[in-house]
Image (cartoon, grey):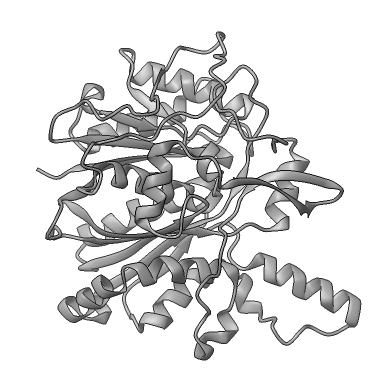
Amino acid sequence: MTAYLNSLGLICALGQDRASVARALFAGDTSGMRSENGWLPERSLPVAAVKGALPPIPAALGQQSSRNNQLLLAAALQIEPQIHQAIDQYGRERIGVILGTSTSGIDEASRGIAAYLRDEAFPDSYDYRQQELSAPANFLTTWLELSGPSYVISTACTSSARALLSARRLLDMNLCDAVLCGGVDSLCKLTLNGFSALEAVSGERCNPFSVNRNGINIGEAAVLFLMTRRAGDDHHIALLGAGASSDAHHISAPEPHGRGAQQAMRKALDNAHLHPGDIGYLNLHGTATQHNDSMESVAVNAIFPGGVPCSSTKPMSGHTLGAAGALEAAFCWLALSPDNYTQQLPPHVWDNQADTSLPAMTWVKPGDVLQSQAPRRLMSNSFAFGGNNVSLIIGDAA
């Protein structure tokens, strides 16, 4: 069964809607990555934050107020007409909500607990439901008055990639006729301090696959697809294949030879009935840590020995953790969109200083375009703590 990705709402450091994100993405614009104070004690560091006002949470849902849900609402409002059209067509009980997150409303909860320790009372704005991992799906389901399957996946940096995979499964099993799927994660001190404790955060803009790479930059984003069995009116972009694996090598370090990553990519290709040569572009996980980039380059070289145009988009968007898988699938969607009539690809932004100990890669340069003819197929990789791996293939449906 074909799972069409008919509508897309997104917000991240690159922009607050689809058009502005696409312009910045294809231009290789890193201006959304800015150094900020206050996240870590006595240290500034680059973060990819969403700037500007976010929509307020409706008063009736005030107990679910969090920045995470505000980001999600901003993405949902962009496709609200298409959502209501689906509700009218299928009914509220036939529409699911599957999202990925890692932060949920933990930042609001942290501030509430700090206030309790200081004042022996929680602030009026605190509600325990803000911090639950299920909060984004609960909020979206309540706001839209949906009654189909609704849940959140939290598998670190593969969370929202798995949400797309799971959404397609709901359509396959005929449990839903449409699924709102994607991911959302907001900047918060917990994750920034956690990655800093792992000595994985760079004090500069991240530099994926460079010999000078020294860590990640954290970002925030919300991405929401409307996935259905039927194609949209103006395009036929679909989730063609998905593969997942878990090598369970280490709680935070990837398996050095990328066996699980290779397995996920092979599964995605097999699932889509494609060969490596059919893929016109690969969006890498590309975190710019020593171990991830080494592992991924080995894995990609094993699957694509002839090379494949590829890039890491994290110097522009930051690593958006639970939202990363859906965000980078959205970047592939934007590359395939009719609005991208020149078929530009996201460039690889780095210092051009290759790590010669790693297999050579075919980097997308600014202005490069998709060379493959229709049907076009793009792959996106997401790898997470605990050896959790997902590869997605987005492309033109036959």
Tell me if 128 is positioned left or right of 160 in this view. Answer: right
Up/down of 129 relative to 307, above or below: below
Horizontal relation, residue 190 to residue 311: left or right: right
Residue 147: image location, x then y, percent: 33, 80
Residue plotted at (77% across, 45% down): 44
Residue 323 lies, in percent from the top left, at 49, 53
User: What residue is rendered at 59% in x and 69% in y?
Assistant: 67
The residue shown at (12%, 60%) is 233
The residue positioned farthest toward the left in the image shown: 398
Closer to us: 176 or 10: 10
Q: Is residue 214 left or right of residue 369?
A: right
Depicted 33 relative to depicted 293: above or below: below
Furthest residue toward top: 356
Asked whether 17 or 291 is in front, the reply is: 17
Q: Is residue 152 above or below residue 372?
A: below
Q: Which residue appears at 45% of the width and 12% of the height? A: 360
Q: Find residue 93 and report its image quarter.
A: bottom left
Q: Quadrant of the C terminus?
A: top left
Q: Can residue 161 be seen in this view?
A: no
| Image location of residue 38, percent across then percent down | 78, 55
- Rendered location of residue 20, percent (x, y): 40, 53
Q: Looking at the picture, does residue 49 appear above or below residue 212? A: below
Q: Can residue 150 be seen in this view?
A: yes
